[in-house]
Image (tube, rainbow, N blue to C red):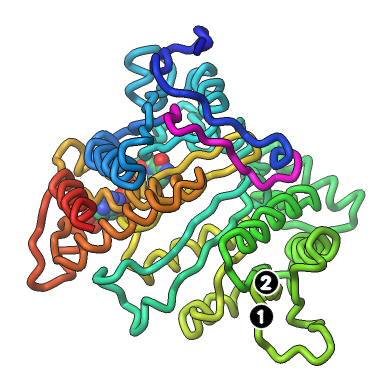
């Protein structure tokens, strides 16, 4: 097999490329074709990134070897990003890294520092925007044994699809007192007859039908492919009618246009429906965002797949992560039609960098998510089970140990080794 030679770091000499199924690239389901010996990209990340990667990689290799009886193997390809890339190539995010991610299609990454000052943009935001990774996907499920503030944390089992490219996070804003803010304010006053305080900073909240529909389509396909029974659109459309309200309307539109035979609408059920959701179908409903924050606390078992806008999704995913044990155990991915990046959802935790201390759980569970995306369900289940068994056995890193009386605190790499032991014994 011939590899392209225009990358900063050469891909491994062995292994084959993962490709995107052509029909799914059009439809936006992101289905990929995965050979038995795939090349998968990785970005170690900054701060604690190398610690968690060193702990997680052998776990992934073990799960693959065990699930496939040695038939499958990942050929890891390090693609440069962050401080490591800067020290080697003088750039935090070289263009060839973006090419490499598109070539690899599937990439797993640790956290990246956003250098302070100099107007430096977040590398994570840049990756999302340049690769059009429009869906931030955060599964939130309870790993048995994890300390939780909930009475019944096992009822929490949801996947959040957060729109990643629009909303007040689009970065269209002007600082108070600048000539730009003055220009926008004058336009609003003179042309639109809207008064804004003279000293106000101003931000714009774009929400479009195309971005909404591709996100909701992906959420519906996820529910159908994974036997999930409910999809909930979360919005604040009662107040922001033409953005959040429109998001709701466009979500219903695509459900009607493309999935009419697979969806039951809660507010317009079929005549005589007995309330049981048949296999192969999903119940489609929507909730106002503030009420949803109550619902996920009081009635979490009633929610499975959530599709929402950028800001709501940001808040909701962290609130849900807290219900099942916090950031150290929260996986995530940013997915587009051409590539998917699976990542630890926490930051670089600089005070723990190089101490072999931090919890690698978030990266491990992101790897399980990556295996699911690749269609390697058994590998995914082994990683989740291995993590769960290690936690149940009370072998945990400091963050969980301080909440679990009687547990045995282990290092970051020690947790990885414990997970491998459990996978071997499963
Ligand atoms: P952070 O790195 O997430 O760390 C904040 C605190 O959260 C840590 O001190 C630790 O709390 C806890 N924590 C984080 N990860 C943990 C883990 N794996 N296991 C156990 N505890 C964990 O947040 P930050 O200090 O605000 O951000 C640092 C840098 O990371 C910034 O440069 C930021 O831009 C970047 N960042 C990157 C990403 C990304 O790449 N996706 C995301 C967020 C932030 P205790 O001290 O209480 O133990």
Magenta span of residues: 26-41
Residue 174 in view in this figure:
no
Q: Is residue 309 above or below residue 270?
A: above
Which residue is pictured at 79% across the width and 66% down the height? Answer: 252
Q: Is residue 361 left or right of residue 334?
A: left
Q: Is residue 29 left or right of residue 355?
A: right
Rendering coords of residue 316 (x, y %): 51, 65
Reading the image, the residue beneath label 2 is: 282
Cβ atoms under marks 1 and 2 closer than 8 Å: yes
Reading the image, the residue beneath label 1 is: 277
The quadrant in which the C terminus is found is bottom left
Q: Is residue 116 above or below residue 384?
A: above
Mark 1 → mark 2, Cα distance in angstroms: 7 Å
Which residue is pictured at 51% across the width and 62% down the height? Answer: 315
Out of 202 and 393, give the one closest to the viewer: 393
Rendering coords of residue 193 (x, y %): 89, 57
Q: Is residue 215 left or right of residue 345?
A: right
Q: Quadrant of residue 244?
A: bottom right
Q: Residue furthest right?
A: 191
Which residue is pictured at 32% across the width and 66% down the height? Answer: 143
């Amino acid at each position: 097999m011939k590899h392209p030679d225009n990358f900063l770091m050469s891909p491994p000499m062995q292994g084959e490329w993962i490709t995107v199924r052509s029909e799914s690239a059009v439809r936006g389901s992101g289905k990929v074709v995965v050979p038995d010996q795939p090349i998968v990209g990785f970005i170690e990340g900054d701060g604690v990134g190398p610690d968690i990667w060193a702990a997680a990689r052998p776990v992934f290799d073990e799960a693959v070897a065990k699930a496939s009886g040695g038939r499958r193997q990942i050929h890891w390809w390090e693609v440069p990003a962050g401080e490591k890339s800067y020290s080697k190539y003088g750039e935090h995010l070289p263009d060839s890294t973006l090419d490499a991610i598109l070539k690899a299609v599937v990439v797993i990454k640790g956290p990246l520092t956003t250098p302070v000052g100099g107007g430096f943009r977040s590398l994570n935001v840049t990756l999302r925007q340049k690769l059009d990774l429009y869906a931030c996907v955060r599964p939130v499920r309870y790993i048995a044994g994890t300390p939780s503030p909930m009475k019944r944390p096992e009822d929490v089992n949801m996947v959040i699809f957060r729109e990643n490219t629009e909303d007040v996070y689009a970065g269209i804003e002007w600082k108070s007192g600048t000539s730009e803010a003055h220009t926008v304010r004058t336009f609003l006053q003179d042309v639109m007859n809207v008064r804004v305080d003279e000293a106000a900073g101003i931000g714009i909240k774009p929400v479009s039908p195309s971005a909404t529909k591709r996100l909701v389509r992906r959420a519906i396909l996820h529910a159908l492919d994974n036997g999930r029974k409910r999809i909930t659109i979360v919005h604040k459309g009662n107040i922001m009618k033409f953005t959040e309200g429109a998001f709701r309307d466009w979500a219903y539109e695509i459900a009607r246009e493309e999935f009419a035979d697979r969806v039951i609408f809660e507010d317009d059920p079929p005549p005589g429906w007995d309330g049981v959701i048949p296999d192969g179908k999903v119940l489609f409903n929507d909730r106002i965002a503030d009420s949803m924050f109550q619902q996920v606390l009081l009635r979490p078992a009633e929610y499975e797949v959530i599709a929402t806008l950028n800001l709501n999704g940001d808040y909701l995913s962290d609130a849900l992560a807290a219900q099942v044990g916090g950031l150290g155990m929260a996986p995530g991915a940013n997915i587009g039609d051409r590539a998917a990046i699976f990542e630890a959802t926490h930051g670089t935790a600089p005070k723990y960098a190089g101490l072999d201390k931090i919890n690698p759980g978030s990266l491990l569970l992101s790897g399980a998510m990556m295996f699911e995306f690749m269609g390697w369900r058994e590998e995914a289940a082994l990683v989740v089970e291995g993590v769960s068994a290690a936690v149940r056995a009370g072998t945990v890193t400091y963050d969980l140990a301080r909440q679990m009386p009687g547990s045995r605190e282990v290092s970051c790499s020690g947790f990885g080794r414990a997970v491998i032991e459990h996978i071997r014994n499963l």
